[in-house]
Amino acid sequence: MRPSPTLGVEEEYLLVDPTTRDLVADPPPDFMAECKERLGERVTPEFLKCQIEVGTPVCADIGEARRHLTALRRCLIDAAERHGMSLIAASTHPFADWGAQKHTEAPRYDMLDADMGGAIRRMLICGMHVHAGIEDPDLRIDLMNQTRYFLPHLLALSTSSPFWSGHDMKMKCARLGIFDSMPRTGVPDRYESWSEYERTVERLVKAGVIEDSSKIWWDMRPSARFPTLEMRITDVCTRLEDALCVAALYQSILRMLARMKDRNMRWRIYPRLMLEENRWRAERYGCTKSMIDLGRGECVPFAALIEELIELVAEDAAALGCQDEVRHARTILKRGTSACWQLEVYGDARGQGAEHDEALKAVVDMLVRETAADLPA
């Protein structure tokens, strides 16, 4: 019943003009052509032309995921620079106007535009998705039910969207508030079996409201294409090391829960209302304040919860060879997430006399630097 240790990571990035620091609404066609020539199916356009997505192949371990993500980020940064652009890994742009963006011309995106209207047009947001291989479909559902508890913890470690359309949203993750205007989002429901989940999907398909389960955009879902459980709640991490930490923690949590199942144990299933409350706290405060320990029924400093989690999955991280990546969560707590840095850069610039617009441009400059910071030249 143990899931395989395989994983895959998808990341979405934004293309910016290095002069204006605004988004490039209509990138040169040669840019995507070059990326496709070099990376093939590992790179794809997104709904908005200013976005680009990469995905690793199936990776045997976190070390292989590191090699692929490093190469993918480096390739896109270099290609963007050759075409007069910069690349940032952040879930929102500090000041770009979503209404000024253009959507990619393709049948799939035209259909989304026709179906979703304004909800899809303002999806000027980027995320990171992690697929973990779980071959048994009933185990996939069982682990989804239990892992929902830890989704806010992963989100809090990844936050990179404090600004929206030039406004400080007073949140570390503004992205989910935007994404939740789409249907079929949020914490997934609890299902007793794979069969029950399939019946639910089939009823929606039969009703004609979705074509398949790929149109279910929960924070975590059984993949429609692969034998994986796909974690989708997290912001895209500006630093590569932070992204690898989140992926390693997710993989270790799944292995820990599967190991508990081998001993006829399981994580307690809590009401969705309580899970959603921690999700909100992760959106609002990121890793800087407290989260509810649902077992104790009280708010606990987030740092204490992460220490408990690192200890809880220590055996599994060792078995998966990702102890260093899991322990990197302590570094994130110490120096903050991308959202923390963005707010700090903005505040420092304003404190030094910069106007609001110039301070936001300073945030973009920092994001360009930090997106490439972990990568070899």
Image (spheres, grey):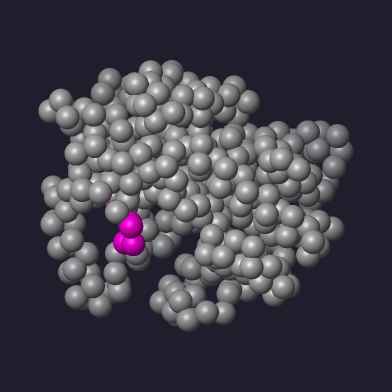
Q: Is residue 223 magenta?
A: yes
Q: Can I make out residue 297 in this image?
A: yes
Residue depicted at x 42% and y 33%:
249
**Magenta segment boundaries in residue numbering:** 222-226
Which quadrant, please, contains the N terminus?
Answer: top left
Q: Can I make out residue 290 in this image?
A: no
Residue depicted at x 60% and y 29%:
336
Q: Residue furthest right?
A: 353
Q: Is residue 295 magenta?
A: no
When asked about the image quadrant of residue 83, the answer is bottom right
- The picture places residue 194, in percent across and down from the top left corner, at 17, 53
In the figure, 287 relative to 307: above or below? Answer: below
Residue depicted at x 51% and y 36%:
63
- Please indicate whether residue 74 sits to the left or right of residue 1 in the image: right
Q: Nearer the viewer, residue 270 or 108?
A: 108
- Please indicate whether residue 92 sits to the left or right of residue 224 in the image: right
When asked about the image quadrant of residue 122, the answer is bottom right
Q: Nearer the viewer, residue 64 or 89?
A: 64
The image shows a total of numbered marks equal to 0
Residue depicted at x 33% and y 57%:
226
Magenta span main SS:
loop
- The picture places residue 29, in percent across and down from the top left corner, at 69, 75
Q: Nearer the viewer, residue 276 or 72?
A: 72
- Please indicate whether residue 367 sits to the left or right of residue 190 in the image: right
Which quadrant, please, contains the C terminus?
Answer: top right
When asked about the image quadrant of residue 208, the answer is bottom left
